[in-house]
Amino acid sequence: MQYYDQDTLIYLNDKFVRANNATVDLFGQSLHYGYGAFEGLRAYSTHNGTRIFKAEEHFERLKNSCEAIGLPYRWDHRDLIERTYELLEVNKLRGAYIRPLVYSGSNMHLTTSNTANLMIAAWEWAPYLGQNLLRVNISKIQRPNPKSFPTDAKVSGQYINSILATSDAIQQGFDEALLMDQEGFVAQASSENLFIEKDNKIYTPPLGNIFPGISRETVKEICKSLNFEIIEKRLTIKEVYEADSAFLSGTAAEIIGIKQVDHVIFPEEWEDTVGSSIQRKYKNLVLEQENYEVII
């Protein structure tokens, strides 16, 4: 996939520059050690114009991720949101995926950085995992231990783990991987949160060993608004296998149903599941097809 061309602009350290003219510091810790933090947002073309879904929450999480690893963060959220709308406008994008990245300056020592750079890029991107029901496997690769790494921060280096898990799943003929935590409970997918349905109730792993997704919180809000019971509990592989249905959530992937895990095909038709109702409600929210507060 081509993410930019000769006309694409990115926002880099308070200026709009052409993507193909941007440079990176070859002595930066982000390149050598994965010492950086990033976010993923989506803008949608709505009847109210282009809208970025939950922009404030995403930039707040970016700040929190930087603080978790000692990376300086000097930017104002409101200003960054305005600059992001400008970025969409100059690139003539109405619907897009948006990627802010904070990366360090030159430093070959294994110490926190006292300088940081900010880049924001945007491109047209369909749902990350497509729109067909997924075939996923239980990966042999585990989530990082939260006692050794801030797993609730969206930090560049930890996504090596996700790359390995997803690549291995695809090589085995699956679409995505489910990772277990260090205690053997199913935690999440490579870059999405997991939900299972059993007897018209939704279950999802609790915080602690998972990434605290903003889309995950949106799913919880939707369940409350639709009077669906949602329960946070640690999930065993057996409980996942015995679910009636399951789905994933994430900004890039949005809401996507799961057809099977390993050899087990879920018995419920997706269109008849609670997850399908949540998927439709989510789409209505991001497209502002019903009353919903969106921060711009």
Image (spheres, grey):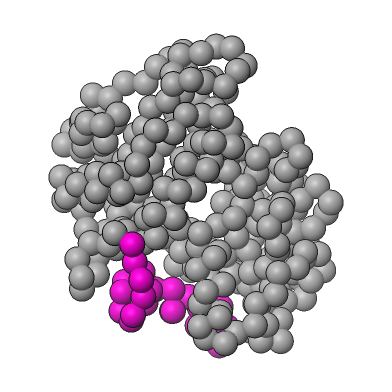
* Image location (x, y in percent) of residue 101: 41, 36
Where's the C terminus, which quadrant?
Answer: bottom left
Q: Please name whichever residue, 111 or 235, is drawn nearer the observer in this view of the structure.
A: 111
| Residue 2 can be seen, yes or no | no
- Quarter-of-image position of residue 238: bottom right
* Image location (x, y in percent) of residue 165: 65, 45
Q: Please name whichever residue, 166 or 162, is drawn nearer the observer in this view of the structure.
A: 162
Q: Is residue 25 left or right of residue 212?
A: left
Q: In the image, is residue 285 part of the stretch drawn in magenta?
A: yes
| Residue 86 can be seen, yes or no | yes
* Image location (x, y in percent) of residue 100: 38, 41
Number of marks in picture: 0
Where's the N terminus, which quadrant?
Answer: top left
Q: Residue at x 48, y 20 (%)?
A: 114
* Image location (x, y in percent) of residue 172: 65, 51
Q: Residue at x 38, y 27 (%)?
A: 117
Q: Residue at x 71, y 87 (%)?
A: 199
Q: Residue at x 79, y 58 (%)?
A: 185
Q: Is residue 16 left or right of residue 224?
A: left
Q: Is residue 232 above or below residue 189?
A: below
Q: In the image, is residue 110 part of the stretch drawn in magenta?
A: no
Q: Is residue 2 above or below residue 252?
A: above
Q: Is residue 11 left or right of residue 138?
A: left
Q: Which residues are magenta?
A: 269-295
Q: Is residue 33 left or right of residue 104?
A: right
